Amino acid sequence: MKRKAFSATAVVGLFVAATVVSNAPVQGHDDDLFFRRQSEIQKGFAIAPVWLNLDGKDPALVGLGSYIVNAQAGCNDCHTCPSYDPSAYDGHPQGHNPFPPPFGDLGDGKINSQKYLAGGVDFGPPPNMGGVTSDNLTPDSTGKPDGLTLEQFKIVIRTGHDVLTAGHPTLAVMPWPYYRNMTDLDLDAIYTFLRAIPSATTPATHCANAGE
């Protein structure tokens, strides 16, 4: 089957309207809820910093997941290294980081699309932890974000347990105590969005913090 990839801009009108208004978006979810959230779905497509593979995925879930990830949860800050496009542009030799010096260059906030959500942000060595580096959330070779099934993803978000690590240690940095209150619909949407983004390798040189 030919792989289908779409830009965020191209997808907004074509898929959102048809999916949200005309069709039942996702079996098992409340259609009326999707209708009431279509502005978030549209916004999600508009702000997605990367091309999205919608092949076999529900566009409404992808758009809603993008809105949650990129407008509410702030996943980019901890899972993209560096968080903002580091390339110089007019008047901003240090890149697109929107924060003031020394953390940034008062840039326009353009996300680092080349390493979007590929992990590699180093949070240092908390006591007895041996160091914490953010995970690569992009799809693996089987299409699973961070190598997680949907069920495993929900366990991670709701309990903070790193199910892919022996002993299932509790995540030390990710704000799962807040994220665990998200609805099943929200978590389904986030997972579907993460399945739709491009795979990327974790940077060999880790960032000291999300702002670099």
Image (cartoon, rainbow, N blue to C red):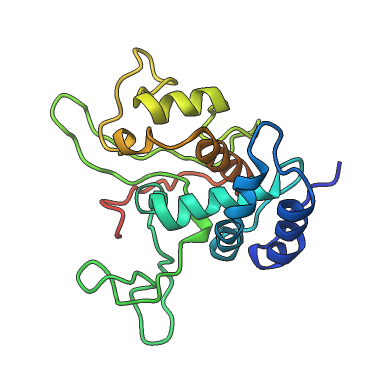
Q: Quadrant of the C terminus?
A: bottom left
Name the residue located 23 percent from the left edge and 66 percent from the top edge.
103
Using residue 26 as the reference point, say whether residue 23 is left or right of it.
right
Q: In which quarter of the image is residue 159?
A: top left
Residue 71, x across and y down, in percent = 44, 58
Most extreme residue toward the top is 167
Residue 134, x across and y down, in percent = 36, 40
Q: Nearer the viewer, residue 49 or 31?
A: 31
Most extreme residue toward the left is 127
Residue 53, x across and y down, in percent = 70, 49
Most extreme residue toward the front is 32
Most extreme residue toward the right is 1
Using residue 151 as the reference point, say whether residue 171 is left or right of it.
left
Numbered-mark total: 0
User: Does 21 appear above or below 33?
Assistant: below
User: Does 194 appear above or below 176?
Assistant: below
User: Does 175 appear above or below 96?
Assistant: above
Q: In which quarter of the image is the N terminus?
A: top right
Question: Could one spot residue 14 in this view of the protein?
Answer: yes
User: Does 166 appear above or below 149?
Assistant: above
Using residue 159 as the reference point, say whether residue 189 is left or right of it.
right
Residue 199, x across and y down, in percent = 59, 45
Name the residue located 19 percent from the left edge and 35 percent from the top edge.
125
Name the residue located 54 percent from the left edge and 29 percent from the top edge.
147
Question: Could one spot residue 49 in this view of the protein?
Answer: no
Using residue 83 as the reference point, say whether residue 186 is left or right of it.
right
